[in-house]
Amino acid sequence: EDQVTQSPEALRLQEGESSSLNCSYTVSGLRGLFWYRQDPGKGPEFLFTLYSAGEEKEKERLKATLTKKESFLHITAPKPEDSATYLCAVQDWSNDYKLSFGAGTTVTVRA
Amino acid sequence: GAVVSQHPSRVICKSGTSVKIECRSLDFQATTMFWYRQFPKQSLMLMATSNEGSKATYEQGVEKDKFLINHASLTLSTLTVTSAHPEDSSFYICSARGQGPSGANVLTFGAGSRLTVL
């Protein structure tokens, strides 16, 4: 069974204070690792897909990296609008495009 | 880009009634749609997978008679919560797999539906 563990559960940052979120995963055959952003009362918004160890992707102040066991989401010089819950999910080759989600990291950026 | 519309966004109903939630892919054809349930401060739990024109596949522990899923066309899937009870109160989110700007492998999510059963 696929397992996804995210840490920390919550992260409070000062504006401009860079930090990283961790996503550890166990999967029989990784098709892809996904990062989503979720605002309160909304559905997840797609950020990145990573497919193989060593891959990196960037979007504005966010950068996602992948190893064989974990992924990191780096937030550089965050702004208050980066406050959200960041969800990590894995897709297994044997699971027909289903996503298994972690519990998320709730990031709060103070001005 | 790929857009999934979910309706209603909020619904309040009395115990014992049934509620239908719609999920539509607006600018692409979704061969597969997924229904998730999310409790406060918890992750998304997959309930079922629906493929257009065939019966839905339910995850272990999900009552298929309680949560009826219909995927009648390539752009519409519905979730009906039958004989709803307070413990069915939750945030229900659909997602669709199809050709979006990031490719067919990416799931696009709807905005979610908050169900409150009194």
Image: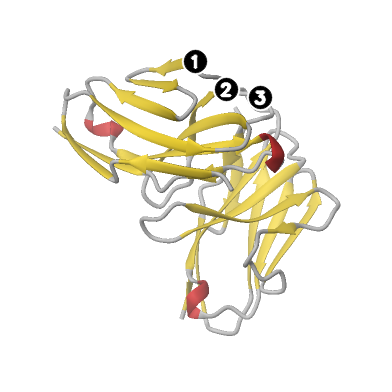
Q: CA distance from mark 2 to mark 1?
A: 7 Å
Question: Residue B27, image x and y in percent?
Answer: 68, 33
Nearer the observer: mark 2 or 3; the answer is 2
What's the residue type where badge 3 is placed?
Answer: Gly
Quick one: which residue is furthest to the bottom in this view? B16
Badge 2: chain ID: A
Query: How many numbered marks does the figure carry?
Result: 3
Quadrant in the rendering for residue A84:
top left
- Would you place residue A24 above or below residue A49 in this image? below
At mark 3, the secondary structure is loop
Quarter of the image that includes the C terminus of chain A: top left
Question: Residue B19, image x and y in percent?
Answer: 62, 71
Question: Where does label 2 land, which residue?
Answer: A51
The lab-note entry on whether marks 2 and 1 share a chain reads yes
Q: Residue at x 43, y 30 (%)?
A: A70
Q: Residue at x 59, y 48 (%)?
A: A1
Q: CA distance from mark 3 to mark 1?
A: 17 Å
Which residue is at the front of the view, B106 or A99? A99
Question: Where does label 3 land, which residue?
Answer: B103
Quick one: which residue is furthest to the right in this view? B53
Badge 1: chain ID: A
Badge 3: chain ID: B
The lab-note entry on whether marks 2 and 3 share a chain reads no
The circle drawn on residue A55 is: 1
- Would you place residue A51 above or below residue B7 in this image? above
